[in-house]
Structures are given as structure tokens and as C-alpha cells.
Image: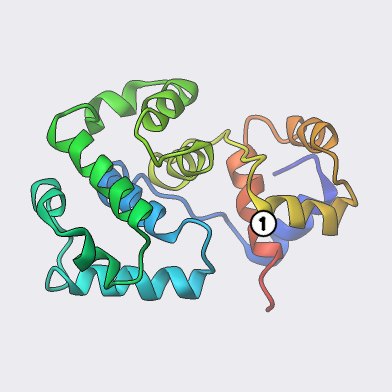
Amino acid sequence: MFSDPILNKLHKKYGPHKFEDRSEKLYEELVESIIGQQLSGKAADTIFKRFLALFNNKFPTPEKLMKTDDEKLRSAGMSYSKAAYIKNIAKAFKEKQLEVKKIKKLSDEEVRKELTKIKGVGNWTAEMILIFTLKREDVFSLGDAGLRHAIKNLYKIEKEKDILKLSENWKPNRSFACWYLWRSLENR
């Protein structure tokens, strides 16, 4: 699959990469990404479950989320800033600043620009949405600490310019390379 022997070894170990188009869940995926930002997987899952519990375990509509008191959101374990950011996402969807049909037609860079217009959505979040929600095949997230750690472990490379140069070898399948690199960090 790859011309890179390290990635080929990971491919043999972990099997086919698993991506699906989840674009119809863009609103939910953005909110969940913000809730989980800069948290361990376990902490993010716990806070997200508490968030859903606030709404009887059903994802709130943008309108309902916008009307939710910040203190109620804080009771689920999120900061004031994250509460504001997820409301910004809800507002963008309610006001049709973001529409799935339009987003799907945009280039990766155009998607990144549209998403990062929303306060609280940064490049990392946009890249994760491109990879895991929109199923874009050639996205590399230089800002992802896990990817940088995996590359340091497997390739002994740490400098940004060297990481970017390495990632060029994986075009047009950099999203799949990321998936294998993340898997390499699992303790299995």
C-alpha cells in the first residue's frame, strides 16, 4: 500500500484503515471535538457522556444548545470557554453559516478556512473533521501531538520541516498514514 516500509509493517499489523463518511454528523462531530480538545480520551469520553446526559442522552439541536445555561454545561465538566465554543458551533449551524452540502463540495483548505472562522475551532479540530468526518484521504496534522510522538518513535524525526518532508512521501494517502501512526501508539 505504501512505499514506506514502516507504514507497510503497521498496515500488516493493524489491517485496513477504517474511515467512513460521517459528513451528515458534522454538527455533532464538531461539538464533540471541542468538548474533547486537549483532554485524554478517557476524560473526553466522561465529559461527553455527562454532556449528553444533560439532554436525556440525545444530542441537542443547535437551538437547544444555544439556550442552555453555561453553568449547566459547566456541570458536565467543561470550561466556560468550551461552553462558549460549542455554542458558537450551534449558532453557525442555526444561522446556516455552515451547511453540510456546501462543506462537502469545498477543497480541504476551503473547509479548514470555513471551520476556523468559528471561534474555538482551530486547525487541529478542522484537520480531525477532514479526516474522520469528511473522509478526506490526504490530510496530515502537523499540530497533532500523537502523530509527532509516533514519528519520533518510529522515524527518529522531531523537526517540523523534517516531519513535513516525510509526510510528503505519503501523498495522496496521508490521512491513512496518520491512522496507522496513531494506532502505533496503542499499547496492545
Give amino acid for label 1.
Answer: Gly
| Position above or below: 162 against 19 | above
Specify few, some or many for label 1: CA neighbours under 10 Å numbering under 14, 14-19, or 20 or more.
some
Say left or right for 32 vs 8. left
Q: Position of residue 186 (x, y in %)?
A: 66, 71
Residue at 37% x, 25% y: name it: 114
**Quadrant that contains the N terminus:** top right
Element marked by disc 1: helix
Which of 138/88 is in front? 88
Residue at 71% x, 61% y: name it: 12
Protein image colouring:
rainbow
Q: Can residue 108 be seen?
A: yes
According to the picture, the residue beneath numbered tag 1 turns out to be 146
* Quarter location, residue 10: bottom right
| Position above or below: 9 against 139 | below
Residue at 12% x, 73% y: name it: 56
Q: Position of residue 172 (x, y in %)?
A: 63, 30
